[in-house]
Amino acid sequence: LNLVVAPTSVVPNWEREIAKFAPGLKTVVWQGPNRSQRAPELEKADVMITSYALLRRDEELLQALDLRYVILDEAQHIKNPMSQTARSAKKLSSERRLALTGTPIENRLSELWSIFDFVSPGLLGTLKTFEERIARTAQRLRATIKPFIMRRLKRDVAADLPDKIEQEMIVPLAEAQAKLYKQVLGQVRKSVLSEVEKKGVSKAQIQILVALTRLRQVACDPRLMKLPDTDFDADDSGKLGALREIIDEAIDGGHRVLVFSQFVGMLNHIRAALDADGVEYEYLDGSTKDRIERVDRFNEETGAPVFLISLKAGGTGLNLTGADTVIHFDPWWNPAVEDQATDRAHRIGQTKNVNVYKLIAAGTVEEKILELSAKKRELVSNVLSTEGSPLKGLTKADVENLFSE
């Protein structure tokens, strides 16, 4: 028996792909409230597919299985070595282990250690040893992990894949929006810098993230702040206006569009705008139950021309090659997450060039996030490829720059 563990939303994809490419394999999908009734089927099954949530919940049953292979899909789910998910995965008994991920490093090198602690326990030493010695030297770390990594780049396995054309669109804030942004920046800047001065960057992260979120919300749409006694509307979001123009032009040109946002509230404002514009769309966030049906409808040639997607809920595991235009409404400094979302369209099966737009609010923290995003790319490249040296994490200077006027 072979076990595949994947995010809940991706489990149906594994079932469908196995049925398509290996129909001779007997598969048991271990999900749902009545899953225990399927236990007898496991004796004759070739593949068992379950989720990370059930990996924790059914830990005892899964640990008792005699497994040939354990495959973790989207293995960044075990990036925190202290989490129950990571501990449950590492307790599984199997002959072989495989971790699949497009984002082995999202924020810090200890995430890579946690994945390797599952694949090959002890290879990188203890976490403390790793952080104190190995992680500090990119060349040494690369040499250690190289035999265990198969890095699959799209240019290597899909040389005929159409081009991906990326464009950063700097969008001015609306007048009322710019005024509010300046007010909020003034409020949070002093308190954040004071906390960093007292505690240091690592211990002030909660305050930093809260302040950044407030600034990002204003940069997207003032209505996300839900301020009392205010009367903002759709015209007070510069980026929403730009998005409507891009979508209008794309539809006129016969293109089909994916729109990603990290804020579900922003997606709801976009929905209202598209309703007002008479634009048909599909929608997906963490509460969506019929994900596969919506994906299938969109991928049909006669499907809606726009798909609105929560980055967290739909940034992985979906095949949306029916689209040839991708719009990231709000940037974040983890480029790997954005790249994975873009790859819902730019993947094997795509026959058209894919245009990717990143909407950036001019003169805001979003422009500064782009600079930090470049650092993240360099960190991943340094460890997984053959050049450069690793960069440190967020510094005091970074924080001061983020909250500067």
Image (cartoon, rainbow, N blue to C red):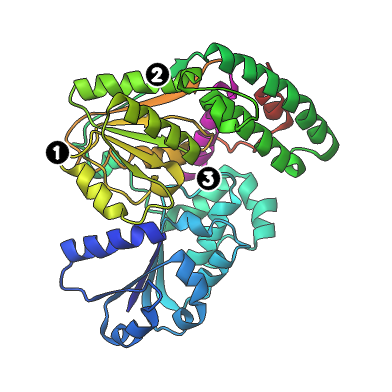
Vertical placement of residue 307 versus 180, above or below:
below
Q: Neighbour class for label 3 at 10 Å: few (<14), some, many (≥20)? A: many
Residue 92 x, y percent position in the rendering: 48, 76
Q: Is residue 382 left or right of residue 200?
A: left
Residue 302 badge: 1
Residue 320 x, y percent position in the rendering: 26, 43
| CA–CA distance in space, label 1 to label 3 | 37 Å
Which amino acid does the dot numbered 3 rest on? Answer: Glu
Q: Is residue 71 left or right of residue 379?
A: left
- Main SS, magenta region, reads helix
**Can see residue 111?**
yes
| CA–CA distance in space, label 2 to label 3 | 29 Å
Residue 138 x, y percent position in the rendering: 57, 43
Residue 248 badge: none
Q: Quadrant of the N terminus?
A: bottom left
- Mark 2 sits on what residue? 242
Q: Which residues are magenta?
A: 364-387
Which one is earlier in the sequence, the residue at label 2 or at label 3? 3
Which amino acid does the dot numbered 2 rest on? Answer: Ala
- Mark 3 sits on what residue? 106
Quarter assignment of residue 148:
bottom left
Vertical placement of residue 24 versus 140, above or below:
below
Q: Neighbour class for label 2 at 10 Å: few (<14), some, many (≥20)? A: some
Which one is earlier in the sequence, the residue at label 1 or at label 2? 2
Camera-nearest label, 2 or 3: 2
Label 1: state its secondary structure.
loop
Label 3: state its secondary structure.
loop
